[in-house]
Image (cartoon, rainbow, N blue to C red):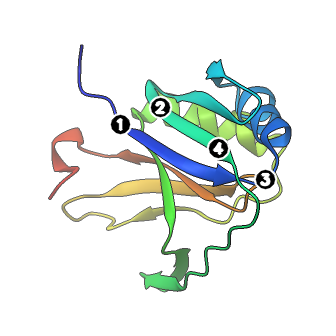
Amino acid sequence: MSTKFHISLPCKDLNKTIKFYTEELGLEIGRKTNNWADINLFSHQITFVTSDKFDFQYPMYSLEKDQLPSFHFGVILENDEWEKTYDRINKWSFDTIIKKTFFEDKKGEQSSFFIKDPNNYFLEFKTFKKRNEIFM
């Protein structure tokens, strides 16, 4: 088994969260109860747990003149999968914050887009021009 990433996050409404990730993003749900559910985010596990009140106040940060959310999570995809994912999401989402290539013609050149889920979490989908430059 290759290494997988796991994160657990509070959610406001489990049913809306499940619907967003399965119906809107086309992802699979794993185990679930009345209070939590596992989502398969490109072979990585996100567990959403129903929580009374939570509030993540976080600032934006600047990257090449763009304002990006400092609190976000996401996946790095191969370019073809990234394009397919963007096209699928762009058909229904009006909340795509930014679709842009960063560090163009430099080490670590990457394209990204962000969307917001029902809990106001930002998800980033990114792809690198050169896969071996992910950590450069």
Residue that appears at 54% across and 85% down: 59
Disc 1 marks which amino acid? Answer: Phe
Counting the numbered discs, the total is: 4
- Marks 4/1: CA–CA distance: 17 Å
N-terminal of the two: label 4 or label 3? 4
Report which quarter residue 33 is drawn in: top right
Mark 2 lies on residue? 45
- Marks 4/3: CA–CA distance: 13 Å
Disc 4 marks which amino acid? Answer: Val
Against 70, is 128 above or below?
A: above
- Marks 2/4: CA–CA distance: 13 Å
N-terminal of the two: label 3 or label 1? 1
Against 43, is 94 above or below?
A: below
Q: Please tell me how crowded label 3 is: few (under 14), some (14-19), or many (20+) other residues with Cα within 10 Å.
A: some
Which mark is on residue 49?
Answer: 4
Which mark is on residue 118?
Answer: 3
Disc 3 marks which amino acid? Answer: Pro
**Residue 27 or residue 67, whichever sits in front:** 27
